[in-house]
Amino acid sequence: MTTTEAAPTHLRENPYAIARQQLRLVGETFAIDPNLINVLEQCKKSVEVSIPVTKDDGSVQAFTGYRVTHNIARGPSKGGIRYHPDVTLDEVKALAMWMTWKCALMGIPFGGAKGGVVCDPKQLSRRELEGLTRRYTSEIINDIGPEKDIPAPDVGTDASVMAWIFDTFSMNKGHSVLGVVTGKPLAIGGSLGRDEATARGALYVITDALAEEDRGFDGLRVAVQGFGNVGAHLARMLAEEGARVIAVSDSRGGLHDPNGLDVSSVLAHKAEHGTLAGFGGADAVSNDELLLLDCDVLAPCALEQVITPENASQVKARIICEGANGPITPGADEILEDRGVLVLPDVLANAGGVVVSYFEWVQGLQEYFWKEEEVNARLNDIVTRAFRETVETRAKHGTSMRMAAYGLGVRRVAEATVTRGLYP
């Protein structure tokens, strides 16, 4: 039997250290009791499990999995599960903490959680992936539930993975439990609009940011790093709004056309070939090069820490929309802020997914499902309200959009913590 240990992180900085650094800075900026900050920087629970899987060739491989609950002061914890070879416990802790602030900023009654398995899903057959998912679910089954901790898709996972989690959990309970996960297929209680919700939320935030400048999408030059669920949907939506999508990329590289890509053709090529490579009619560009292209809006929708102090001064975009979690390091944040680049932070820009996950959870509990137009309208209301509150907080405290958004989220969790008190 072979064992897959947690891979050494590819990140230059420890993500959990970054998350705690951000929290302490929020505490100083908004004069939050240091004792509360000490409480909030700790994760409530961290679970590490071994996941043995019988491979198609008969061998057995053991994978490492995690599930972290950061905080439940405002309700059950909520957060995605990612399958990626670079998953680490500290990464999962950071993502769980960011989810806490994100849910609070959006005003939805969840705390933050996150899960991950150290694996490369592209190297697993569908049968192996299902076996991995069902065993992982069985290992964390006492830690999740509709009133406890609700997983969702993330990097490397999708609606099929959520279906396997839902089925495994339900079979163990003896009845169907619709609310145990979100991001499920429509056939088993998923919500209309959930698949593209993260991208749609980002679109609404970009729309609001442009409105602040009395500008629309016509002629807007956009570069999108990452062409998975978030990046692909966002590129399509931006093109439909009239923006000129000049570059997109996936894990193998990207495409660049300063006159604008035919996004529908790019999507068709990706669907057929599973990669952007080989698409004609555009110049090749690396993921690193894409970040430095001359554009109006840059949307990093892949992984963390792609914009660092080493390249932040070369970024030409005037607006950065964080479709991914933590794509900008704190050092890069300072450089961008000094240069006047508007950063639409992750807890605001990519919160559409968890908002519609909340809608799916509510619909599952009610056993009454909404029309897609209703889902999108309610999403727009919540995201736009959060944007306005962030802009107002930024102006009041003279701080960055990130600090304003994090400050709103942290203060709401702090208030809930004080209101509940400490037990015993």
Image (spheres, grey):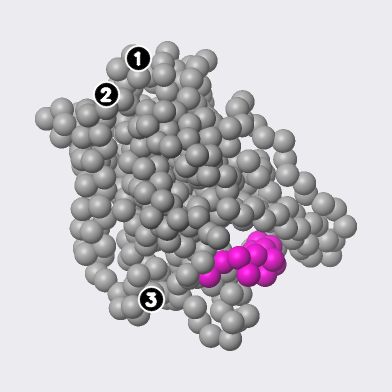
Q: Quadrant of the C terminus?
A: bottom right
Vertical relation: 129 (above or below) 416: below
Q: Which residues are magenta?
A: 129-145
Amino acid at the residue labelled 2: Gly
- Which image quarter: residue 397? top left
User: Is 39 displayed left or right of 47 in the figure?
Assistant: left
Direction right: furthest residue: 1
Q: Amino acid at mark 1?
A: Asp
Question: Secondary structure of the magenta portion, mostly?
Answer: helix
Residue 209 visible somewhere in the drawing = no
Tell me the crowding category of disc 3: few under 14, some 14 to 19, or many 20 or more residues within 10 angstroms, Cα based: some
Q: Residue 398, labelled with which disc? A: 2
Provide the secondary structure element on which disc 3 rests: helix
Task: Tell me what residue is drawn at x 21 percent, y 64 percent.
Answer: 374
Say few, some or many: other residues with alpha carbon within 10 Å of mark 1 (under 14 / 14 to 19 / 20 or more).
few
- Pick whichever of labels 2 and 3 is earlier in the sequence: 3
Pointer 1: what residue? Answer: 338
Drawn side of residue 211 relative to residue 166, left or right: left
Above or below, 68 against 359 in this view is above
Identify the residue at image location x=44%, y=18%: 312
As rendered, which of 279 and 177 lies closer to the eye? 177
Q: Is residue 8 left or right of residue 296?
A: right
Q: Which element is circle 2 on?
A: loop
Which residue is at 80% across, 57% downward? 61
Front one among 233 and 333: 333
Residue 150 is inside the magenta segment: no
Residue 365 badge: 3
Disc 3 or 1, which lies upstream in sequence?
1
Image spot of residue 379 (x, y percent): 26, 55
Q: Which amino acid type is marked by label 3?
A: Leu
Q: Label 3, label 1: how many angstroms apart (C-alpha)?
A: 47 Å
Nearest the viewer among 314 and 422 is: 422
